[in-house]
Amino acid sequence: MKMFKKPKGTEDFYPSEQEVKNKVFEVFRKVCRKYGFLEVETPAFETVELLTKKSGEEIKEQLFLFKRKDKEEFGLRFDLTVPIARMFVEKQKELPKPVKWFAISRMWRYERPQAGRLREFYQLSVEFFGAKYAEADAEIINISIDVLKQFGLNENDFVVKLNNRKLLEGLLLQFVKEDKVDSIIRIIDKKSKVNADEFNQMLAEAGLQLKDISKIKKILAADTIEKIDKLEKNAIANEGFEELKQIYEMVDKRFIQLDLSTARGLAYYTDAVFEVFDKNQELRSIAGGGRYDNLVELFGGQPTPATGFAMGLSTLLLLLGKKKAVPKADIGPDYFVAIVGESARQDAMKIVAEIRKKYNVETDFLRRSLSKQITYANAIGAKNLIVIGEEEIKSGKIKVKDLKTGKESSVSISEI
Amino acid sequence: MKMFKKPKGTEDFYPSEQEVKNKVFEVFRKVCRKYGFLEVETPAFETVELLTKKSGEEIKEQLFLFKRKDKEEFGLRFDLTVPIARMFVEKQKELPKPVKWFAISRMWRYERPQAGRLREFYQLSVEFFGAKYAEADAEIINISIDVLKQFGLNENDFVVKLNNRKLLEGLLLQFVKEDKVDSIIRIIDKKSKVNADEFNQMLAEAGLQLKDISKIKKILAADTIEKIDKLEKNAIANEGFEELKQIYEMVDKRFIQLDLSTARGLAYYTDAVFEVFDKNQELRSIAGGGRYDNLVELFGGQPTPATGFAMGLSTLLLLLGKKKAVPKADIGPDYFVAIVGESARQDAMKIVAEIRKKYNVETDFLRRSLSKQITYANAIGAKNLIVIGEEEIKSGKIKVKDLKTGKESSVSISEI
């Protein structure tokens, strides 16, 4: 007989995995609410027109697309920022500003599946619309740090790499032609993934002279406010540097590493950008974000500054796994009520219903022998065992056995 | 400038709607866990082969389908039972039986959107694998009742219509040819949606004689155990009646209405079937379910009895709305910290961080005047207002204003 498989690059969440996911999401939710962010949710799919607006037609390669009745074309969302921004634009006029929203949900990309990167994946997405000052960026960075701290992680476990797109672009524009800046940034963004020789070669192939490559290396070596301060800067670089300094003053410096190579690809970021990595940098980035002041206008809204970040479940769980900080999945019922003899069932079920008012309770549905019921109770991780037969029903006295310690106590039903 | 719209038949959940949804889902979760059910989640899409296995090719009309690189064809899931059953089959051998799972998630059908029926919709799905006895069906029905009771609803608000497919089929087979039974059941299932004349006409068009139509009316009029008992029954009808009686003994009869016209269409149900309606039957069904003993085998698993039900969010919210029982969306922050003067910001943010250890706190990110900050605090529903300026920082004494009562109290920061 044929066995059906789930689609490649997707996950089933069996009970203990689902419980871990729920607990991680509860931490996300709690921290976001502490910071005054409110949860929203959007449809799983959007029009292709919206989905390609920001990233161009090339994103279509990564979209799960579908058409119905040859009318409008839709695609599964590939992030949460795009639909949340669309939602914001639809009610922009009536919403009190600023608007602080988050979403915890799944999205889809058609890519080659790899560790920490699936075709269906879950993310926390935090979006802050309508605040142009550095304190909004700092708030976003602080949440991303606070979320990880809530799992018990500290500055020995992860680092936030912080940069500013204007600073980097401004520095490059002093010796790189404007039409080449994007491709150079794309190479710089890959620096941590290649070795020094490969990095040099990529820059040379992009048309840079040896002296320009040295300049880039000098820029990327500037990893403190003092060192960046000493770099020669044009007006735009100075503007970016001012923003960077202001943000740096408002975040927890123990976690921050200034890193001019952090550019977040060619995404929609305009100013601050940051990425969170495990300290040993063995994993893909845990979170990433920054300021995107042009997106709302691009989507047809009033020009609105915005900043935000996203954190993926998958890589986070890999990090928590390494640090032995994965939330415990506690899914066993509080009580298993074993039923001895079918004549006791009706009364036993009343006792089950009574205990369920306060506790999670499982019982036998297979009319099994007592020993098989106890085996099952242990298999599902029940915490306590109660045996109900005619005797217990007559006397109203029942024995509760703690299945961990083996300790037994005799109680009346009303005492549970 | 063009404004992008969400796809037709889908919903955006703005913060208060999302909060209501989360609260409803928490009730689902809590009740299911009380009954020993564990939460699972499956991918949003499955292979078309799986999706069409149970319902045939005609379900494709309702599927959102997509292909990638001309390989396997996928479709968005249209229910949760199919993927959960697939998940069960994949680990059937290693799982302790019975297996009691639930999922709370969304699914998609390409249909004409109407009240309580969208193209993207959310459901609770409860599935019980491996128990063939009536107590498992009773457990499923009791959960569906208990969920609604948790929202404060009672027997004046909703009714559970209970039937048994074998009973109905057996009764019909006594005078309807076997190859016509399915089409007659399909008509019977629509009885509540048409008037008496239309119902007669549909049965006549299906080829029934007047005397057979009267027999059907007599069957459908039997709405108590006693009346059903008096109906002439063949072996299969008697078997179904026995099951029905056993289940009836184990559920809360205040909510139950025996109704032989409840057939749940031509779905995969084999024995018990039930549907939950608002008492006035103004809405589509709130929940529905039953026993489906053939599905696991159909999906390639070992033959396994199964029973379960699904409850949709959308119709439930319509009912809760009518009964003024929708959970309250409490999304305003506990405190709004107004900042007076930019020189106070750094210290004010420390106070904000301190209060956030215990509460949800919002503050100003737009460097607004105090009066504008207070307007905003009220607009977002903040419960308390704190104003921080140089004076408060110097003295360490702050005033907390309850924004509902207007009452002010003076406290030190550590007292909050």
Image (cartoon, coloured by chain):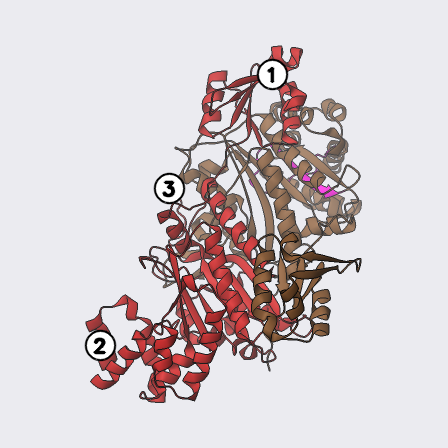
Chain colours: A red, B brown
Chain letter of the residue carrying label 2? A
Chain letter of the residue carrying label 3? A
Residue type, mark 2 in image: Asn
Residue at the image position 53 percent from the left and 31 percent from the top = A333
> Which residues are drawn in magenta?
B257-278
Looking at the image, tell me whether mark 1 or mark 2 is earlier in sequence order: 2
Chain letter of the residue carrying label 1? A
Residue at the image position 39 percent from the left and 33 percent from the top = B94
Whether labels 1 and 2 belong to a single chain: the reply is yes
Taking the image as shown, residue B362 lies to the left or right of residue A4, namely right
Q: CA distance from mark 1 to mark 3?
A: 48 Å
- Residue most extreme to the left: A197
Looking at the image, tell me whether mark 1 or mark 3 is earlier in sequence order: 3
Q: Indicate yes or no whether the magenta region holds residue B273.
A: yes
Which residue is the site of mark 3? A2
Q: Indicate yes or no whether the magenta region holds residue A283.
A: no
**Residue A77 shows in the view:** no
Residue type, mark 1 in image: Ile
Q: Residues within 10 Å of mark 2 (few under 14, many from 20)?
A: many
Image location (x, y in percent) of residue B142: 66, 33
